[in-house]
Structure formats: C-alpha cells, structure tokens
Image (cartoon, rainbow, N blue to C red):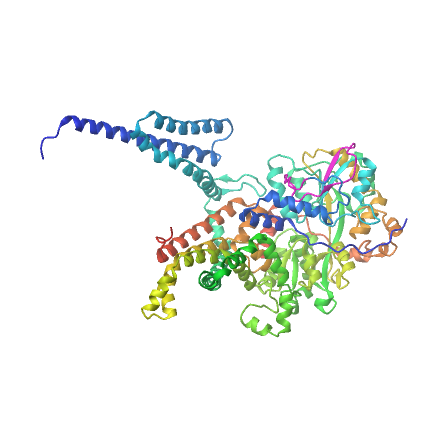
Amino acid sequence: MSEPDPTPWAEDTLTRRAQRGSEWFGLATLLGAGALILAIGMRLVTGALAAVAVVVLVGFVVALIVAAVAGGLEARRRLAPYGLLKPGTLFLVLFYLAPLFSLLRSSLSTLPSRFAVEAEFDWNFGNYGDAFSDFGAQFGRGFLYAGIATVLCVLIGYPLAYVIAFRSGRWRNLLLGLVVVPFFTSYLIRTIAWSSLLADAGPIAGSVRWLHLTGLLEAAQVMDNGRLINTPAAVIGGLTYNFLPFMILPIYVSLEKVSPALVDAAQDLYSSGFRAFRKVVLPLSIPGVFAGTLLTFIPAAGDFVNAEYLGNPNTTMIGNSIQDQFLVQNNVPLASAMSFVLMVIITVAVLIYTTFLGTEELT
Amino acid sequence: MSQPHEPRRPRPARWNRRQLLARGGALGAAGFSLPALLAACGDDDDGGASGTGSTTGSTAGGTAAPGTTAAGGTAAGSGEGGELFFENWPEYIDVTEDGLVGTVDRFAEATGIAMRYTDAFSDNVEYFALIQPVLGRGDTIEPDIIAPTSWLAGRLINLGWVDKLPLDQVPNAANLRTDLQNPAWDPTGEYSLPWQTGITGIAYNLDATGRELTSVADLFDPEFKGRIGMLTEMRDTVGLLLNWLGVDQSTLTTFDEAAEAFDRLAQAKADGQIRAFTGNDYLDDLSTGNFAACIGWSGDVVQLSLENPAVRFIIPDEGGNSWADTMVMPKGAANRDQAAKWMDFVYDPVQAAQITAWVQYVSPVAGLQEEVAKLDPELAESPLLFPDEETLARLSTFANLSEDVEAEFDAAFSEITGA
C-alpha cells in the first residue's frame, strides 16, 4: 500500500462528517417529532403546553425541509429518507403507539373509589391477575370459538375460492360479487337476522322438527335441548358466516395467480389431478390461506356481537367481557388489562403461526 | 268522555342501549360511523312508537350528547314556555295515536313548553355507566329529568349528582301516595318524585309452558331448561329468588344472607336452565315463545298480553317485588321551572289516569281509581293496577344496601350474568 495523498483523504473525512451530520440531524428531527406527538397523543402535555408542543413539532418538520433545501445535493439525498419516513412514522405514533401506551398505562391504574371517573396510575399489576383469574373461561372460549370458526371458514372457503378461480368461466365476476354482496347489509343486522331465523318458532328449527332431524343434530352438538339458537354452535356458526368472505377473497386472489399451465405441466408429467393439486396448486395458494386465517381469526377472537345475539350466558367470549367492563361496569383499568392480554396473546399466536407458515411469499 | 280501553298497536322490536352500542361498535369496525347509526336509529324511533306521538319538530338524531343515545322528538308546543327534556324508559307513557292525545302533547298544548321526550333509558346499570363520566367530572348531561329506579336514585342522591326538585312549585306533589313519602332512598323526599311503581313477578307464555305457573320454583323446573329468562336488574332477579328461599329481602344487611340465592342462580346458569339475562327486551322473546317463562314487570306484561293472550303475569306464591321508578333532576339541569310544571301536570289525577290506563303500572298518585274508572271501569278493578291489602302484603322491596355491600352484590351478580 502506497502513501495516500493527504488532500483527498482530508476531503473524504470532511464529506463523511457532513454526511454523518445530516443523518444525525434527520434522525433527531424524526425522533423529536415522534416523541412530541406521542406526548400529545397520550395527553401527557395539555392546554397551553400542548400548543407549544405542536409549534415545536411543526418546527422539526420545517427544520428538516429547510436543511434539505439549503443543503447541497448530497445533504438532500441523505435527508430524503427521514423526510419520507416522517408522515408514516408520525401517523403510527399518534394512532397506534400513543393509544397503546395509554391502554398500558390505564391497565396499570386503580380506580380510587367505586364510582370514580379517573383511574390513578400506580403500577397496579393486580388488574392482570384479575383479568386471568376472573375471565380465564371467557379467554378460552374466545380463542376456541374463533379457532373452530377459522377452520370451518377454510373448509368452506377454500373449495369455493377454488371453483370461482378455476371452474367458474364467465360466471366468475358474478360469483365473486355474490361473496361480497352480504357486506352491503350491516354486520349487526345480519347477525340479528340469524337470531330470528334460528329462533325456536323460526323457520329453520321448524324444518328440523318436521324432518325429524332433532336427534341427529343433538348428537352432533348443533342443537341443545331442541334449540338451535343460544347454543355454542350458533355462536360458532355466526362467526363462520360473518367472517367467511374474509377467507374466500384472499384465497381466491392467490389461486387466481396460479397459472393453469402449471397444472397442465404436472399432468403431462403423469401426475394425477389430486397430486397436481397437492404438489402445485395448494403450495402456491398457502399465502392466501395464511392471510385469510389471520383476517378471520384475529377479529373473531375479539368479537362480541355473535355471542351477544346467538349465545347464552354460558357462551360469552372475551369480547363480551371487555365490552361489559368498559361500557357497563365502567372498570376501565380492568378492561384495559383484559384488552392488553388479548392483544399480547393474539400477537404471540400470530408470531408462532408465522414461523410455521412463513410470510416471505406474502408481498 | 270515556275512552274505550283498546289493545295497543303491535309492538316494534326494541333496542336497548347495549344493543345500540353493539351495533355502533360493529358498524364502526365495518367502517361506518356511530353518529350516522344513531341518527338512523333516531329516525327509526320517530317513525315508531317512541312515545312522543306527534313530533312536529323532531330533533336530529345524531346529536349524541352526554346522557342520550337515541333521540326522540320534540312535542308540539310553541316553545314560548321554554324547553324541557325528559329521558324515560320505553313504553312508559301514553302516546299519541288515533283518537288519543298523549300526555306529552297535552302538556305542551297546555303550557307552551317545547318538550323533548325520549325513551333511551333501558337499563339502570348501563344508564349509570353512560352518565357517570359526565356527572362525575362535574359536567351536566342534557336531560332535565331522568327516570332511575329507586336504588339508583338513592345512589345519585348520595353522590350529590342530582339537584333538589323545585317542589314548592309543584302543588300536586301533595297527591303522592302516603306510603311513598320520605322513602328509604330519599329520606327527606326533596330529590325525587316517583314516576310509576310496579310489581316484579313471573311472566310466562302459556303456549310454551303448557300449564299455569304459580311459583318461583317453576323457573327452575328442568322441563323449561334453556327457555327461562331472568332480568339483568339485580334487585328484581335476586329479590324474587330470596322471596322463594324465605329470606326477607327488605332487611338484608350482608351478602351472606343472600348467598344462597346467588348459588341457586349460578347453578341454574351452569345447568343451562337460563337462556338469557335481559333488560326491557325480554318481551319479544316471551311473545315468540323463546322464553317459556321469565321474570318480568307487571305493566309491560299486561300490555303485551293484550296483543298475545297466551302471555300471563303472576305474583308468585312466595311473593313478588315492588319497586319504584323516580323522576330526578341531574345536577345542573337547566329547565327547573319547566320541570316543575311537568311534575305538577303528571301528578294531576286526571292526567295521571291517562298514563296509568296506558302503561298499566301502579301509579304513585293517590286517589286515581275514580279517574281510571271513568276511562275504563274494568281496569280500575285490576289488582295489578290498584293492589288491594292482600296483594300488597305479598310484595316486598329490596333493602337499601350500604355501598360496600352493594358492591359485593353487584360483583357476584355480574359474575353470574356472564359477561
């Protein structure tokens, strides 16, 4: 290695220092703005102080723009990512992180008296103990019912999506439309409609009695003591019905991308139709199934509408308990702890699920 | 001017607040907004039997101000006399319909007060949860008069969240039944004036039960497994069970005295005996036969039985509960003079008789039997409207619990109701 020329080396250092300076500056404005909007979102600063914070926040944004405009081409190149990150970051901090921290904070608070309005923050981990000990059964039912409903959705949704993608010909758009049509009616109205349809004196229970299928359905645990409604099966059925389109659509999208030529190729290589499906179509549609199960399971686990209208006092899900604690008992700390636990369990479950099924093909 | 006592129009499906919120929540999740939904429901109410009758200038439903969910309407009235807002329970006043002018309209006509009457009050616990954050911060809620049941009125009085009534401007308050003067929940009688009182007993659908019921024990009959309804109102449900178990509900001081009732209830729930715990919405299930039998309120069921003769109401052999819903003015209520006029109006026996003939509850206004007889002689003989000594002896009222004990009762009850 020969003696380096001192001058370019010095220039290089200078440039690097300037570059590093730009990066620090960009990062600082991003973090500063994020911290301020978090403080505002969590209502840690209020009143006049909040107004000041907003002004400073705007200052950070303006400073970044000014620095980028005033600086050279290199500085702009360095600062651009921070500028582009800013809207998304601030949005996430304000509408995701701030509420999340607020929820965490109130889950560690205590109501000073029974009818108090404001809970006091005092690291009260007892709320989490209560959430588990008092509502363990509801947590269990919530995940059980959501899990069964998700499996049913796959079993019903996959064949349907398959037929629409490969066998529907010119009816494809019509069939897809029919999958979505129920959404034009409110979720609640549809659920309540089921409670009328399944009522003791309703048409479905009447048909079952007329066909003398009561014994069969009782054995299959679908009926309970001659009732279709206010049973676990009704709740699971309601969840399945309501979330089915969320399963069908992602599976359809992934199946639709599978080229029929691949199936032809498999069959040219003497694969049976089923084997071609198992080795070619199914693996290629797994991302759709993955997305569909998440879209079904996560909202279903927190749902309370189906259990409210189609269930009985022994089928309440965790969503019902959280709703009751928040809106009826006004026990915000306990309700927050329950919400947090629900969120953590779902996150962990999804992470485990992801490691097994993988997401790299989900783009 | 004797009006024939006719059956009411068919009852539209009712939504309580929990259901409204549930609908709102789910719709919100689906990308709709709560105010839009409430507006829709408000319109719905205006069209249905919201109890307001002729709604000349119906207020926009979307104004989801504290203390209100669905909006009713503003009654006829020039507005010269000021405004008044009364939030009451559903089906709790005579409405304007063919050939009849409802109390709200008659009041507006007589006083020139623009009255807004809504029926969003459907569950004491839920209503309290709704107003607690507002009144607890020292803010005012929109209604000038609300209609909590006596125990909730007592709680609001203790919390200092209600104003004294302008009773000096209510000469007709002298018509209050003597047994309701200075009640346990309001010992000085300065904060509350009963709206209606009534009886909690057993309602059943004869088509579904196939036999007449007589006792609370019938609610635990395995024959009716999964077809029994109980009320989310703790005092009604537990009180009736206590009567059955031979415990005097009016003298309770500790939770242990009532523990057996809670055990029985928990057992019945675990066995699948109980189909649902409901608020005012039990009537639909009863009418369609989803409930073979349930705990119910006298006036509601009597009204319903006019439409569906299979529906019956009994005071069980072991005894029923008597209760009172009251008019109180939330702290800072704006229209005190108008509220006084309203209370005076509805405590006039002539007006009170109209309400009684419609709602079929026990009026708190004394000397009403003659006035009701003018409207409907048969009704004036009904023991459910004018209980005789013998009936009264079979009724008791839930004790006024201390705050700590009440918390124990509430916690145990909400554990059973399952949510």
Work out whether residue A319 or residue A4 is closer to the camera in this orientation and state it. A4
**Residue B335 sits inside the magenta stretch:** no
Work out whether residue B18 or residue A72 is closer to the camera in this orientation and state it. A72
- Region in magenta: B60-85
Q: Is residue B47 above or below residue A162?
A: above
Q: Residue at x 33, y 68 (%)?
A: A268
Image x and y of residue A128, in percent = 46, 49
Work out whether residue A283 or residue B88 is closer to the camera in this orientation and state it. A283
Q: Residue furthest top?
A: A70
Rendered-image quadrant of the C terminus of chain B: bottom right
Whether residue B108 sits left or right of residue A92 in the image: it is right
Image x and y of residue A43, in percent = 49, 34
Q: Residue at x 42, y 51 (%)?
A: A347
Q: Residue at x 45, y 60 (%)?
A: A165
Whether residue A221 sits left or right of residue A254 in the image: it is right
Magenta portion: prevailing SS class: loop
Q: Residue furthest front?
A: A170
Image x and y of residue A272, in percent = 36, 71
Q: Is residue A176 above or below residue A105?
A: below
Residue A76 in view in this figure: yes
Q: Quadrant of residue A182?
A: bottom right
Whether residue A109 sits left or right of residue B104 in the image: it is left
Q: Residue furthest right?
A: B1
Q: Is residue A340 above or below residue B305?
A: above
